[in-house]
Image (cartoon, helix red, strand yellow):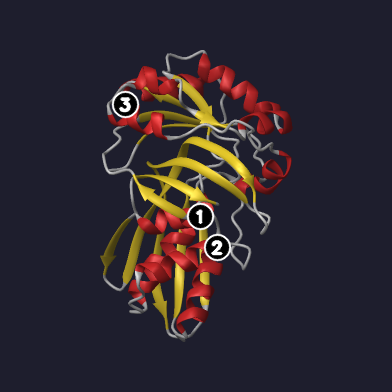
Amino acid sequence: MLIRQDGTALWVHAPAKLNLFLEVLGKRADGFHELETLMVAISLHDTLSFTEEPTPAIRLHCHSRLGSAEAVPTGDDNLVVRAAKLLQQYSGTSRGVSIHLWKRIPMAAGLAGGSTDAAAALVALDRLWELGLAPEELLSLAAQLGSDVAFFVRRVPAAICRGRGEKIQEVDRPLELSFVVARPASGLSTAEVFRHCRVSSRPRSVRPLVELLIDGRLKAASRCLHNSLQETATQLNPEVTDLITRLDGQPVVASAMTGSGTACFGLCGTPRLAGRIARGLRGSGVPWVMAVQTRA
């Protein structure tokens, strides 16, 4: 997450994420699932600006770059508005904000577009409203908004996340990786995917993948890419299967689905190769595709 001041406004680049590993370990008493996942922030990002309002109002203005088919809500059903109101309630502040959101991250794709925008709101408004909250307070608020929000609040490039995603262990070595990321025309509901998923009877560990990626052994690491939600997603949406097949037909090291889908990625040897594959897939009719790199 990149933040800069421009006059009276704070501008934030809120990155998307990929899950290079995701294991569902069990269902919890609170209805959520226990997970172990490796998340990396990538160069695809939404942009948000925050300018203080003279009233306590929270005003959100969305500028979607995704086309009319993906209209972005601007009320309480948007996580950005919910994050701002939660921060107001928690801190007791009566300060307001006008927020502009330029949406680039596809929705219902497993790229955490809503979660990263919510994290941007928490971090930026803590600064804009001069609240001075402790990191632990922001992380506690993040957990109330969604399972992926804490990862972005921590502002780390890569992390092993456990619990329902809110327990963050930073990967202490840089992972310099390139990907081609694609999404079919339709999305999937995260809740629906988790409702139908199976808990693994023989769960895998994320550690071998992390160690291989740190060592730069991409070919060996490709055998450790894993998403236990992928089978469920392909049953619910055949377009995921088609997209994985298309990616496997390209010169990628390996492919997998991210999060609860429907976006999928191919791990590439170089940024140039990722760009070439992205152009080819775009020309073949894949609705949304982009070459990305991990964030430092």
Mark 2 crowd level (few <14, some 14–19, many ≥20, 10 Å Cα): many
Say which quadrant the N terminus sits in: bottom left
Q: Residue 43 appears at what percent x and percent y?
A: 36, 41
Residue 42: percent from left, percent from top: 38, 41
Name the mark on residue 228.
Answer: none
In the picture as drawn, the residue positioned furthest to the front comes out as 202
Residue receiving disc 2: 145
Under tag 2, what secondary structure?
Answer: helix
Q: CA distance from mark 3 to mark 1?
A: 26 Å
Q: Nearer the viewer, mark 3 or mark 1?
A: 1
Relative side of 239 to 147, left or right: right
- The disc placed on residue 115 is 1
User: Could you say where residue 67 lies in the image, as x and y percent from the top left?
Assistant: 57, 44
Q: Is residue 230 above or below residue 109?
A: above
Quadrant of the image for the C terminus?
top left
> Could you say which is closer to the camera, residue 17 or residue 168?
168
| Residue in the foreground of this view, choosing between 204 and 241 | 204
Identify which amino acid the numbered label 3 is placed on. Answer: Pro
Q: Is residue 212 visible?
A: yes
